[in-house]
Amino acid sequence: MAKQNDTSKRERGPSDAPRRERSAADSPRRGRSESEGSKRDKVQSDVVEKVLHINRCSKTVKGGKKFSFSALILAGDGNGKVGYGFAKANELTDAIRKGGELARKNMRSFPMEGTTIPHEIVVKFDGVSVLMKPVAKGGGMIAGSKLRDVLELAGIKDVMAKNLSGSNPVNMVKAIFRALDKLQTRDSIKKVRSKA
């Protein structure tokens, strides 16, 4: 009987050791994943999302009408970075979620002078024309609803923006983003003029 007990102890010993090693090795991995997740939350906490436009489309099929949704979402940190996303889905919540993800991925920065833009600019895009003018500090924002939403999320506080033509909300947002992309600092403008 003593010999049988010794053999059973020998069989249990090596099988228990790797289990303890695995549990010890797994604990730091859990710690790293939690810390990485908290870092991601901190990075994304400053970004604000806003639903700018929602559209519902219907298609008549054999069984009746089939609906789909499209959503135009804005995302910005209020400090010189802003983006937009346009997504379609069969469910409204899915369209908003996809649009928000695209907006965060497409966030871009642009030059600013304090709380306004460096210079006046006019941009045309697919039938929509947008005018933007800098305003002195404290002058506030003069803009329509959709233009205002983009500029507020971008962090521009003193500006005059006007939609000169067109009413398509998607094209309007694309036009104002094209205008933001074309903005230049005073130094870059001086360099271009000096070369000319």
Image (cartoon, rainbow, N blue to C red):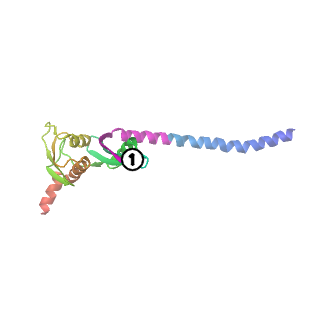
49 lies left or right of 31: left
Q: Quadrant of residue 116?
A: top left
Q: Amino acid at mark 1?
A: Ala
The magenta stretch is: 32-58
Q: Residue furthest bottom?
A: 196
Q: Answer whether residue 147 is visible to the viewer in this image.
A: yes
Identify the residue at image location x=78%, y=40%. 9
The x and y percentages for residue 120 are: 13, 49
The x and y percentages for residue 12 are: 74, 42
Identify the residue at image location x=15%, y=52%. 122
86 lies left or right of 126: right
Q: Closest to the observer: 6 or 46?
A: 46
Residue 67 shown in magenta: no
* Marker count (numbered): 1
Q: Quadrant of residue 141?
A: top left
Q: Closest to the observer: 45 or 99?
A: 99
| Residue corresponding to mark 1 | 89
Residue 34 shown in magenta: yes
For the C terminus, the quadrant is bottom left
Identify the residue at image location x=86%, y=38%. 2
Q: Please, what secondary structure does the residue beneath circle 1 have? A: strand
